[in-house]
Image (tube, rainbow, N blue to C red):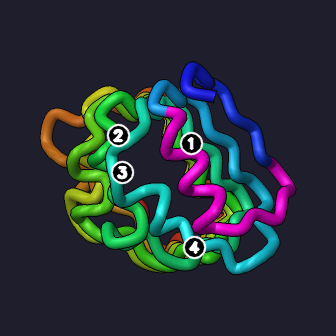
Amino acid sequence: MKNLTILNLEKTHLNNYIFYLQLKKCTRLQYLNLNHQIKNFNFKYFFTTNSFDLREIYLKNANINSIEPEYFNFSLFPRLTDLDLSQNRIGIIKEYYFSQNFLIIQLNLSFNEIKFIENNSFNLFSTNFIDLSFNLLTEFSRSYFTRGFVLSFLKINNNRLNNCSLV
């Protein structure tokens, strides 16, 4: 298990703490799929200590309603390139959520309940794909991105946009 680099646990019912103690030994883990965690799964054990070399994290439909740093400290994964938080219940994106993840290339936040994004929330200089489709946004602004931010692909369809300023 120590050399494990890919772990797919989609649609499983995990015991948080016991699983964490086992997973902690997988220091070379680069890909982790915890999609469709039906129980109230506490991710605090997994994403608040830096014991993994994660590059891809998939948390689609995982009953997540907040990505506060005390539960999801993504800055502890400096090589993280792909992050899927789609189909959850996230309602707000705060400035500091993604402030230290300069390597994220793909960020999927679609099918959440995002109503508000703070200015400078996306400080991801390598990102070329952000999906914010199917949320509850009523406005979208260039101010959500830090200066020098380069983005190739942005999906904001199926929101309730009244105001959209991309310049």
Residue type at mark 1? Ile
Instruction: Give the residue number, with chain letter if any, for mark 3.
Output: 74
Give the magenta part as a residue range: 10-26
Residue that numbered label 1 is attached to: 57
Residue kind at label 2, given as amino acid type? Phe
Three-letter code, disc 3: Phe
Distance from Cα at disc 1 to Cα at disc 2: 10 Å
Kindly check if marks 1 and 2 are in contact, taking CB atoms under 8 A apart as contact. Answer: yes
61 with respect to 79 (left or right): right
Percent x, y for residue 103?
Answer: 33, 29
Q: Do the residues labelled 3 and 2 touch (CB within 8 Å)?
A: yes
**Along the polypeptide, which appears first: circle 4 or circle 1?**
4
Spatial CA distance of label 3 from label 2 is 6 Å
Element type at mark 1: strand
What is the x, y in percent for residue 92? 43, 76
* Residue at 63% from the left image edge and 67% from the top image edge: 16
